[in-house]
Amino acid sequence: MDKFVIRGGKTLSGTVQISGAKNALLALMPATILAPGSYTIHNSPILRDITTMSRLLESMGISTSHKDHAIALNSSKLTSFEAPYEHVKKMRASVYVLGPLVARYGQAHVSLPGGCAWGPRPVNLHIEGLRKLGAEINIDAGYIIAKAKRLKGARIVFDVSSVGATGNVMMAAVLAKGTTVIDNAAMEPEITALGEFLVKMGAKIHGVGTNHLEIEGVDELRPADFTTIPDRIEAGTFLTAAALAGKRGKKVRLEKCNPRHLTAVTTKLEDAGAKLTLGSDFIEIEPPEEIQPVNVTTSIYSGFPTDMQAQWIALMSLASGTSVVTETIYTDRFMHVPELSRLGANINVKENVATIVGVEKLTGAKVMSTDLRASASLILAGLVANGTTEVLRVYHLDRGYEAIEKKLASLGADIKREAGEEF
Ligand code: UD1
């Protein structure tokens, strides 16, 4: 398994291009099940999770080819309605095939995702939503077995705002008979992108981008092309890297991003003392003279994203005081804390609250990636730690950051990918 070897202390400056959003693409690709034919999705990042989704769709008879950051898919002939455990265990977002399969083909056999590195991640809301639309769903031998003749519009109020459940139910409702109303729908930009894609395919959805969706089911949809939105979490990660490892007077410029999707993060970075310039599709950042302690509480969009919590803790580890980070989406999501502590961070976690006492310096060590965003926080810490940091098991990073080491190196970081030890 590869590792990253980072020699800390280099100043970041220059320009970096932000890739397309992984989490948008993971919802867009299964949507092609809804209407047979050819699609091209532009601005598609080259990532392990996208390859996993391609393999899953291929196993169902959909052809895919990824070239020059465009994915061509052809869903003319489905040969299987199954998402086997082998795929779903690699990536929970595989469950996105459930809604489209039931809506278009009246049957789906999808492995239950199970837990993840930071605790349980249920899919009850996906199942309850589809049941409301009339799908008959049983759980058998670890699989969700769903059947339906034609789904029927229904009124759904999610108890919890869920990105995945909103995406799944929205993809099912577009082909249902009658109108579906979804309240407490997720408003994350990735779900808005899915809504826009479905509308381009001929779906009738009112309220795209809001938490109240009204979907008039149609008899059929048609294929469409689409351009994926920029990855706001990748952008937020690079902004945080610049805030940590930049230098006053030297700018890091992010291009091909969408600053409107990042307000919660950019505002907090300003509170921490960074200077930011926001354009229509770029952000420039100069780091703080001294990182100010800033509390954050993760929340649904447009609040501070849980996917930026680990990176924020890395930043706060070097703040000039004490800050508090409260995780409300995934209350156990603190796998990065013991690893950051190995680098010298002073963090105390009690239930879902991390208290971070800023330290003067971090010191390089070997640390272990446990999940995607946790690994990103270790890289950020490694960029400023004294000496050498080795981040092991970087396959987690390859799931969600396209060529992160090359992008960081182009900004001046000393980071190399090397063959790591086996575990
Ligand atoms: C998506 C993102 C993930 C991000 C998360 C929250 C993708 C592929 N992944 O994950 O990176 O961290 O949104 O922004 O887009 N819940 C239930 N029952 C369900 C579904 C969810 O109780 O059936 C709960 C979860 O435990 C969690 C909350 O709802 O507490 C939000 O989860 P959700 O928005 O569904 O996250 P994902 O779609 O899995």
Image (cartoon, rainbow, N blue to C red):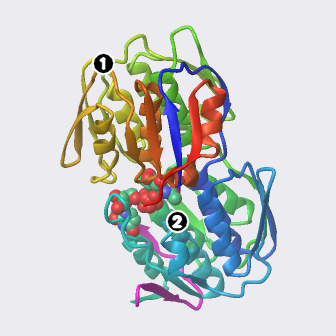
Q: Was residue 163 drawn as part of the magenta stretch in this picture?
A: no
Q: Magenta residues? A: 141-158
Q: Amino acid at mark 2?
A: Ala
Q: Which mark is residue 360?
A: 1
From the viewer's perspective, is 130 left or right of 414? left
Left or right: 162 in relation to 76: left
Q: Residue tagged by mark 2?
A: 93
Which of the pair 272/310 is nearer the observer?
Answer: 310
Q: Is residue 302 visible?
A: no
**Marks 1 and 2 in Cβ contact (< 8 Å):** no
Indicate the position of residue 155 as horizontal and vertical percent values. Answer: 44, 71
Q: Percent position (x, y) of residue 88? A: 51, 73
Q: Quadrant of ligand 1?
A: bottom left
Task: Tell which of 21 and 387 is nearer to you.
Answer: 387
Disc 2 is placed on an element classified as helix
Which amino acid is tagged 1?
Answer: Glu
What residue sits 65% from the left and 81% below the top? 104
Q: Residues within 10 Å of mark 2 (few under 14, many from 20)?
A: some
Queried on whether the Cβ of the residue with tag 2 lies below 8 angstroms from ligand 1, the answer reads yes
Percent of width and height locating residue 386: 40, 24
